[in-house]
Every structure is written in C-alpha cells, then in structure tokens.
Amino acid sequence: MAVAAEAVVEAQLIEHRRGFAKRWYRTPSFVAGVTILGLIVLAAIAAPLITTHGPTSQDLLNTLQGPSGKHWLGTDDLGRDVWSRLVYGARTDLKVAFLAVLFPFTIGTLIGLVAGYYGGWVDTITNWLVNVVVAFPFYVLIIALVFALGSGTRNIYIAITIVGWVSYARIIRGEVLVAKRRDYVLAAKSGGLSDARIIFRHLLPNVVTQAIVFACSDIVLDILAIVTLGYLGLGVQPPNPDWGRMIADGQTFLTTHWELSTVPGIAVVVTALGLSLLADGLADLLRPE
Amino acid sequence: MSEPLLRVRDLRVEFQLARGTLRAVDGVSFDVHPGESLGLVGESGSGKTVALRALVGLLPRTARITGGTVEIDGVDVSSASEARRRELRGTTVSMIFQEPMTALNPVMRVGEQIAETPLVRLGQSRREAKQRALELMRLVGIPDPTRRAEAYPHELSGGMRQRVMIAIALSGNPRLILCDEPTTALDVTIQDQILKLLQQLQRELDVALVFVSHDLAVVAQTSRRVAVMYAGQIVEQGAVADVFREPRHPYTLGLMRSVPDFDAVRETLTAIPGAPPDLASPPRGCRFHPRCQFVQTDCLEGEIPLIELGGDCAARCLHHDQVALDVRREPVIADG
C-alpha cells in the first residue's frame, strides 16, 4: 500500500518538474538575454544578406555622410558603410570573444578539478600560479602580453587564456573542495570507480554550473578587452571591421559625426547587456533544487 | 566452519587532531562468514562507522589505520595497494550509506548510476548494463523501472532512493555489503520495508552483511550476530538472541533498558548516566567505569580483556556475573 501511495506522489513529482525545459520561459532575464543575443548572433550569421555594401569597400566620393536610404547608418571617413561594418564587426568580435572564453574555460576547469580533487602539492602550485596572475590588473597584463606577442586575433586568444584561466580554476577548485566531501563521491569510491571517472563523470557535472555562469559574464569582459585592444590598435587588424577600431576611428569626428563612435559603442553595450541577462537567468535556472 | 569472508584482527584507527591523537577504533576483531550478517551497535562516536570505512580503505584524510589487519576474501586489505583495494570495492565488497539523498549523484539519472558498476567494472556493454540496471531495480522492488531509471534522485522519495542505493550496492555482484545506518533517515514504515528487503536479498543472493546501527531493534531484525561497540572497542559480542536476552556487559544492559519496549516488560526507562568518554584521553581501566552501576575497584586499572563466556559470546567486563544476576532479576526482553 505504502509503495503504491509513494509511487503516485512520485509520478506527480516527475511530471511536475521536468526542470529546465519547463521553467526557462518563466525566467524573464533568461528570455531577455537569449532574445538580445539571438538577434545579434542571427545578424552576424546573416551578415551578407542584411547588408547592402561590403564592410571594407571604400567610396571616397561619399565620405562622412549621415544616415540615408542608401547608407542606413551613414558612411565613415573612407566612405565605408557603417551598418555593414557594424554587422560584420559583430561576426569578428563575437567569434573572438567566444573562443577567448572557451580556451581559459577548458584549461581553468581542468586545472581546478585536478587541484581541488588531489590537493597536496598540485594544489599548492596551482594556488601559487593563480595568486601571481591575480596580483596583476587584468587590462595591464592583457595589454602587456599582446604588446609582447604582437597584435592579431591569435595572440589575443593566447593573452586572454594566460590571464583568464585563473578565474575558472579558482571557481572550480572551490566547488570541488566542497563537492568531494559529499557522500556521492564516497559512494562512487566505494563502487571502485577510478579517480578519472569520479572527477569527470561525478564531480564535473556538479561543479561546472558556476563556471558556465561565470563564463557568460567573462565573455562580456573579453568583448570589452578586445574592443579596448582594437581601440589601442593592438586588436583585430584593419581593414577587418571590429567595434573597437570603429570607435577609435570615429573619435576624430566626434564633434561633427558623433554617430561614428556612438553606434558601435551602443552595440558593445547591448551585447554586454544581453550576456549579463543570460548569465543571470542561467544562474537562476541551473541552481540545484 | 567455512573460511571467513571478512576477518578483522586488532584493527586500530587514529585521527590526528590539533588537541592530540584520537583513537576512534582500538583493537577491534571480528569475523563475518559468507552469507552471514553481523550487526555493529553503539552510540554516536563509538567508532562503528569509522571501523566500517576502514574495512574498505575509505577513511577521511585525517584518519589512519595504525594497526591490525583486515582480510577480505583472503586478501589483506590493510597492506594492499590502493589499486588492489579499488579492485575489491564494488565487485567484492560494496557500501550502502545513511542518507540516500546525498549518497546519490544529484545530476545523474538513477538508471545510469546503477548501470555504472556493470559498465565500468564488469565490462558489460551499454545495453547489457542498462538491462542489468532495470533488472536490479525490479529486484529491489522499484515499480515501473523503465520510467524510474530516467528520474533524477530529487524526483524520488526517500524510500525509493534507498532502494536505488541498494541496487547500486548490488550491481557489482558483491559478496559482502557494508551498511552504514541505511534506515536512520527513513520513516518507520519505510524503514521496515527496507530492512525486510535487505534480509530477503541476503537470503536470495547469499551476500554477507555488516550492519552498523545505533538502533537495537534494527540489528535484532537484520543480524544473526551482534558486536556492541563502546569508545572504540567491542565490549560484547555473540548471537543476537543471546546478547539481547542476557546482556553480560553493563553497557549493553544500559542500552537495552533505555529503549522503550512494546511488550511492556519494563515499566521504566533508564538512561545511561554520563556521556561517552573523550577518545583522545579515555579513562584508565574499563572505559565504561565512570558510567557503570556495577563498578568496583578492580575496574579502575589495567586493560580489561574480552572474556569468553562460551557459546560464541564474549564480554569485556570483569563482573559479567553481576550483570547476569541483575538481568535475571529484571529481564530486558519478553520471552518468546
């Protein structure tokens, strides 16, 4: 009898909360974030379809024109279509930012897992490295590294990875320190599972949430870093469109053609906003019940 | 008699703490034969859980085995390498934990958790392992296993979770299962179901059980033999029927008298006065003497041996005859 009653209650429970799939649309920040980012990503993917001019094609007879039917957001000092450059810029910046998060995320998570699980000298060395990197201000270190390595996207990845992994390693290590004391880890050990299996099959899915949420806000930081590097002339190389360089180039004409800097600036802000909302929503949704 | 499956001799486990060395397990010895069940009883801090973990080498980092031997299936676990111990875990000896909610991985489907040992340790294919998981779920009485296998632990009730735990423990076809208070976190009705299930499985699959509990009734129901632990030592052991009917150690007697009894043999409940000793500095002589009603001067000095009392029974008490007299005057359980 009791089993039957239990079965009914459970059946209701299972129907009731199929977690993520049923709750995501009731989390406003998640919906807003996904919508904003979705539109930007869609625009970046469909760039050739929604632009009227090539992002690098110059028209020196029609420079610095205001918005018109032909050039929706006007043209810059070389007569390039601002709208086209903005959309193609999204392509470059999103791709670079995504990859610039992926590498430190992967490396930092791996190091954090190993350091947290084994402790001892592995942990000591990791902590020492983390503290060394954290001791420097983020931008100073990135700019110094890119300056030393030379500009270009590949070196941006390297620089951001060298600096960025520490945050992920710290987050994951902390989570693992808590999680490895839980009974399910002991239970997995009592089942004779190997360390590697316990780390990747049991600990990783339990601790990776925090790192994913952090990655969403970290990507904002990386976009800003890339834009900053572009602004300083250390980032994406011209004539490839990039929001940072657009802001830098438009600065000269700020008093007469303010939209040249402002439009890509707004694009950065909106993207960052979308990512922040997404991070917030994900944190809500992925929080264990 | 057959060779014991588990042979523990003079096991000692110490914790290194800031305030000194804590002897959690101090010279514990017992045997468990194939298909047999042994209950380890004692209050919190008596060392029963630590002893259980030491058997499979899963002690907390601050604890160390400082003496004695543990043999499982003829293999000396205490001197074996970690790799050798890992080989035994899951397939020869497995564990069931107190709190099924925390002992199950919260983000893994229960079917996958049950299938893991067959998949990884027994080398079964994904399909075989899944099939095996469903079989095990049926065996431990989980209704509608195909659907339940897809559930996450938080979607199941406490009783179902503990059944899943048991299915996991059985999944590697072990010959010995160590149970660490497996029913303490459950309702009384569910507790009874789980205990009956464990007994039934033990009979059908012929596995040996070591059952750690603070609950005398649970041990009486599940085990044929019992060892009572106090302050890191076994103070009394023997067949459950004998020990509970005629306790020969004052601590066992105290435990029996402090439990309510539906047969109404006792009119009053008597608590054991005082508190368990600090294991960093246990009392000299008999460790129970500060709380004992039968204490005499010879209890205060020297190590008290475990005295054989015949019929497989033994008690660590110099005045066990006094205890026996007291029990005869005022029985602790009803006859029959």
Image (cartoon, rainbow, N blue to C red):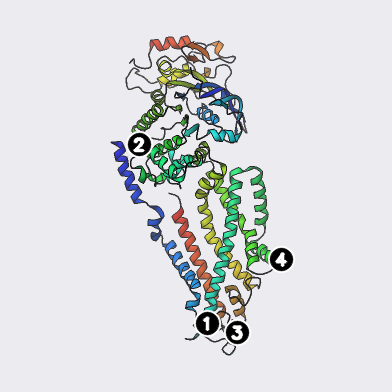
Discs 2, 3: same chain = no
Q: Callout 3: few (<14), some (14-19), or many (20+) C-alpha neighbours within 10 Å?
A: some
Q: Is residue B273 visible?
A: no
List x then y, in percent, for residue B307. Answer: 52, 12
Residue assigned mark 4: A148
| Quarter occupied by residue A233 | bottom right
Q: Is residue A233 visible?
A: yes
List x then y, in percent, for residue B333. Answer: 36, 17
Q: Are marks 2 and 3 in contact (CB under 8 Å)?
A: no
Residue assigned mark 1: A53
Work out how far the residue at label 1 is from the one at label 4, CA to CA, in angstroms.
36 Å
Q: Secondary structure at mark 2?
A: loop
Q: Amino acid at mark 3?
A: Leu
Foreground residue among B101 and B320: B101
Foreground residue among A25 and B58: B58
Q: Chain of mark 1?
A: A
Q: Chain of mark 3?
A: A
Residue assigned mark 3: A78
Q: Is residue B195 above or below residue A55?
A: above
Q: Residue at x 58, y 29 (%)?
A: B77
Q: Secondary structure at mark 4?
A: helix
Of the two numbered discs 1 and 4 in the rendering, the one whose residue sits closer to the viewer = 1
Q: Amino acid at mark 2?
A: Gly
Of the two numbered discs 2 and 3 in the rendering, the one whose residue sits closer to the viewer = 2
Work out how far the residue at label 3 is from the one at label 1, CA to CA, in angstroms.
13 Å
Q: Amino acid at mark 4?
A: Ala
Q: Callout 2: few (<14), some (14-19), or many (20+) C-alpha neighbours within 10 Å?
A: some
Residue assigned mark 2: B141
Q: Is residue A21 left or right of residue B24?
A: left
Q: Residue at x 68, y 54 (%)?
A: A132
